[in-house]
Image: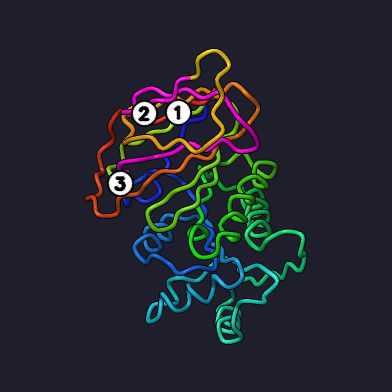
Amino acid sequence: MEEELTPLDCLLPSGTQRICLIILNQPLNKDYLNILWRKALLKACADGAANHLYSSTAGDRDSFLPDYISGDFDSITAEVKAFYADKGCNLIETADQDLTDFTKCVAIMVGEIQRRHLQVDAIVTLGGLAGRFDQTMASVETLHHALSMTPLPMLILQGTSLVHLLRPGSHRLEVNTGLEGDWCSLIPVGGASQTTTTGMKWNLMSRGRKQHSNAEVLSLPKCLRANQDTSEYAKYIQHIDSTKEKRHTQGSNILGRCR
């Protein structure tokens, strides 16, 4: 069955995606935060992310109260923790050190989505792609953990990058928001995979048993069909051009199909 997704719909004020939002412990893009916050049905901070939310929303903090803050609370400051506790935000301590605060936050969110019977199209994460490389890799690891928790797409946004983990199978990705930059990439995860694309300036073509095992940087997508015939996963990375004017009309460009 083909999975369909418009990765950057979540950043369009007029977008129709129903999302839940997780904020990670890294500096926040205020423009992204404002758009995602207004659209999110459920909002959460992973531990020290609450510090960034607190500082970024000075003067209007009551409009940016997360549904919950979770983590081992080794990063959130006492002042910030007390502020959100006084405002009635749910503080959930997760002391388990075998998983990151991000992974544990996702697990709680999935449970809340089910408990509240929310109709959600995607879980969007703000942050997690900057700073220390090991922490970036930990963010990617959480995308893998999420596969066993929920069928919902997981997106990570920060700066000019969006990361989404494609499951083995067929994927159709729309790239008509007007926010797409001039490149995207597919990175096989876990081993080499057979991948083909169409509609790109430079396409991937699997002939016979040729396999792709490295990052493949592709030009601005018009119509990409990526067919993946092994059991391996692939990270899809989309360049976000934040200087482009947001277009609110829907087009017919298709980004991808993986099989």
Determine the image quadrant of residue 59. Answer: bottom left
Q: Is residue 219 left or right of residue 210?
A: left
User: Mark 1 = which residue?
Assistant: 172
The answer to whether residue 143 is above or below residue 135 is: above
**Which numbered marker is on residue 53?**
none
**Real-space CA distance between mark 1 and mark 3, rounded to the nearest whole angstrom:** 18 Å
Residue 249 figure quarter: top left
Task: Give the residue pinned by disc 3.
Answer: 179
Contact check, label 2 and label 1, Cβ < 8 Å = yes
Q: In the rendered view, tell whether residue 243 sits above or below residue 78.
A: above
Task: Give, as a single range, the part of the protein colored magenta.
Answer: 180-205
- Looking at the picture, how far across and down is residue 230, in whole percent? 63, 24
Mark 3 or mark 2: whose residue is earlier in sequence: 3
Q: Position of residue 240 (x, y in %)?
A: 35, 49
Q: Indicate the position of residue 60 as horizontal and vertical percent values.
A: 39, 77
Tag 2 residue: 254
Residue 63 is a magenta residue = no
Check the image and report above or below for 207 versus 144: above
Kind of residue at badge 1: Arg
Q: Residue placed at 35% from the left, 36% from the top? A: 175
Q: CA distance from mark 2 to mark 1?
A: 7 Å
